[in-house]
Image (cartoon, rainbow, N blue to C red):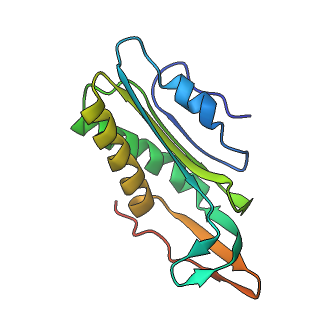
């Protein structure tokens, strides 16, 4: 079971379902007037292909944890006023509509919360080594890995 930390940022890679509501609740702080959450879900299509029925996510887990922490640290460098930052990614076989990634941030003001949330999901997608095998009715294929930036 995923348990949020008492302090610091909440980063994790897990095969468990992601607790979207608990993440949104965890980022709330009395000094922050804005919370932005993003949930990425498995969809029934991909570029040039319809009928996707599942996605299997694989990760180099020993590297994913530090990369997620680096993304959170990068957001804090850009927006030092951030309250809490949560970045969680799921691995394993997920059906259509399952949540595969959650990003949540809190900040005193909405502009910084929106910007930090966007930075976190974009940087996660670009730098964290998670791969996906998309499956449809008559086949499957691996989607390209992220470009890992040290």
> Where is the N terminus found, in terms of image quarters?
top right
| For residue 30, side relative to residue 96 (left or right) | left
State the image coordinates of residue 132 (x, y, percent, origin top left): 61, 70
**Residue at the extreme bottom:** 138
Q: Residue at x 37, y 55 (%)?
A: 123
Q: In which quarter of the image is residue 91?
A: bottom right
State the image coordinates of residue 17 (x, y, percent, origin top left): 71, 45
Q: Quadrant of residue 31?
A: top left
Q: Nearer the viewer, residue 119 or 66?
A: 119
Q: Which residue is drawn at 44% across and 60% down?
A: 125
> Where is the C terminus found, in terms of image quarters?
bottom left
State the image coordinates of residue 24 (x, y, percent, origin top left): 53, 30
| For residue 137, side relative to residue 2 (left or right) | right
Q: Residue at x 44, y 51 (%)?
A: 67
Position above or below: 19 against 98: above
Q: In which quarter of the image is residue 53?
A: bottom right
Q: Which of 111 and 149 is in front in this view?
A: 111
Q: Which of 7 and 122 is in front in this view?
A: 122
> How many discs appear?
0
Q: Which residue is drawn at 51% across and 79% down?
A: 47
Q: Which of 21 and 1 is in front in this view?
A: 21
């Amino acid at each position: 079971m995923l348990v949020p930390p008492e302090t610091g940022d909440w980063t994790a890679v897990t095969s468990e379902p992601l607790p979207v509501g608990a993440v949104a609740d965890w980022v709330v702080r009395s000094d922050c007037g804005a919370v932005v959450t993003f949930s990425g879900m498995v969809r029934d299509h991909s570029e040039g292909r319809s009928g996707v029925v599942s996605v299997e996510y694989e990760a180099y887990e020993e590297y994913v944890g530090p990369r997620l922490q680096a993304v959170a640290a990068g957001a804090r460098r850009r927006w030092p006023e951030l309250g809490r930052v949560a970045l969680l990614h799921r691995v394993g076989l997920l059906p259509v509509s399952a949540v595969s990634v959650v990003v949540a941030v809190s900040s005193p003001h909405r502009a910084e919360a929106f910007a930090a949330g966007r930075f976190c999901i974009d940087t996660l997608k670009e730098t964290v080594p998670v791969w996906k095998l998309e499956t449809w009715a008559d086949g499957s294929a691996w989607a390209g890995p992220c470009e890992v930036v040290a």
